[in-house]
Image (spheres, rainbow, N blue to C red):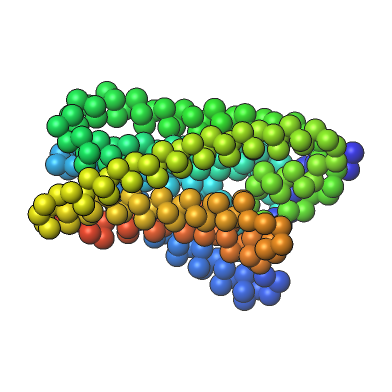
């Protein structure tokens, strides 16, 4: 193929050759997808309908659930359909759309997790200024900034990636369209432009990561100074769900994209891609509702 304009479709990674295993993959992904839809929809409904949950923390949690719904809906339904109909094909347009929404939602979620770390930092380290610093307008602006950052970032990456000539076939070693897999199909040095953009993105992501780490250093320092055990327990309960979500999200993404080539293998890459693209949206509602009495009461209502 001379260039990307001659491509009509891409071939994604097939989970299994046997029909029974393909149906098993369909059922497993269907179960995870339905769990993610149910969990995130319940959180969105509870936060929207219960006025006791109209606080900055739950406002950001509602946005996180919206992002998780979109995130898992970008990749899983197409993978399930391919297994059900015994195919691996995805059209060029659908692949471009998948790349756009995947990058948009994953980057917006990372920005939102950074904002949520700031929210916890203000709540615990500067409680007297919380209402002033985390007013409704400030929260809406921070959430909008996270969504807008993800959108602009995705437009830049998607446009740059699909402007690169592709002539190394149309087969990808991934169950969804992913920028690193598309770059492997490049046949010119133009891909270095996208690689440079990825390096800049890693630097920006590192700044957010350092901000989250420093926030929690201050948070834990402040919590350990609380004299009462009940107060420390309450403060930890406010922070641990967010810390668990951040740890799961960041660790799987970092290992998937920054691991040394010597550790790379198709099986490991597939497992890691499932861990960061499928598992978090399904697990996040469980993490946030497990030890949250207010959310449990709202869900019961």
Left or right: residue 54 versus residue 8 is: left
Image: 124 above or below 270: above
Left or right: residue 101 versus residue 128 is: right
Which residue occupies the foreground of this view, 93 or 281? 281
The quarter of the image holding the N terminus is: top right
Report the number of numbered marks: 0
Quadrant assignment, res 210: top left
Q: Position of residue 23 (x, y in %)?
A: 58, 70
Residue drawn 41% across the image and 27% down it: 145
> Can residue 67 be seen at all in this image of the molecule?
yes
Residue drawn 67% across the image and 57% down it: 260
Image: 45 above or below 172: above
Q: Position of residue 258 (x, y in %)?
A: 62, 51
Residue drawn 31% across the image and 27% down it: 140
Residue drawn 12% across the image and 58% down it: 229
Q: Position of residue 163 (x, y in %)?
A: 75, 31
Q: Position of residue 183 (x, y in %)?
A: 74, 43
Image: 56 above or below 23: above
Which residue occupies the foreground of this view, 144 or 265? 265
> Can residue 60 be seen at all in this image of the molecule?
no
Quadrant assignment, res 189: top right
Left or right: residue 55 versus residue 66 is: left
């Amino acid at each position: 193929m001379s260039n990307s304009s001659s491509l009509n479709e891409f071939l994604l990674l097939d989970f299994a050759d046997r029909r029974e295993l393909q149906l098993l993959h369909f059922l497993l992904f269907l179960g995870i997808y339905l769990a993610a839809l149910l969990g995130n929809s319940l959180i969105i409904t509870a936060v929207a309908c219960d006025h006791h949950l109209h606080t900055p923390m739950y406002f950001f949690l509602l946005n996180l659930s919206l992002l998780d719904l979109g995130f898992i809906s970008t990749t899983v339904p197409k993978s399930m359909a391919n297994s059900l109909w015994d195919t691996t094909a995805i059209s060029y347009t659908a692949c471009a759309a998948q790349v756009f929404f995947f990058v948009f939602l994953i980057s917006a979620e990372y920005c939102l997790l950074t904002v949520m770390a700031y929210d916890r930092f203000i709540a615990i380290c500067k409680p007297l200024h919380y209402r002033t610093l985390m007013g409704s307008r400030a929260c809406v602006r921070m959430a909008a900034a996270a969504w807008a950052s993800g959108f602009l970032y995705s437009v830049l990456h998607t446009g740059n990636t699909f402007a690169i000539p592709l002539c190394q076939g149309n087969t990808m070693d991934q169950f969804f369209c992913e920028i690193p897999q598309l770059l492997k199909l490049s046949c010119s040095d133009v891909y270095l432009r996208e690689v440079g953009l990825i390096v800049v993105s890693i630097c920006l992501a590192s700044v957010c990561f350092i901000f989250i780490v420093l926030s929690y250093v201050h948070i834990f320092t402040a919590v350990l100074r609380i004299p009462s055990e009940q107060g420390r327990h309450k403060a930890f309960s406010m922070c641990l769900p967010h810390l668990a979500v951040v740890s799961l999200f960041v660790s799987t993404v970092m290992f998937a994209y920054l691991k040394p080539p010597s550790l790379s293998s198709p099986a490991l890459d597939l497992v890691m891609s499932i861990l960061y693209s499928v598992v978090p949206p399904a697990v996040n509602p469980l993490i946030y509702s497990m030890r949250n009495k207010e959310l449990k009461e709202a869900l019961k209502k």
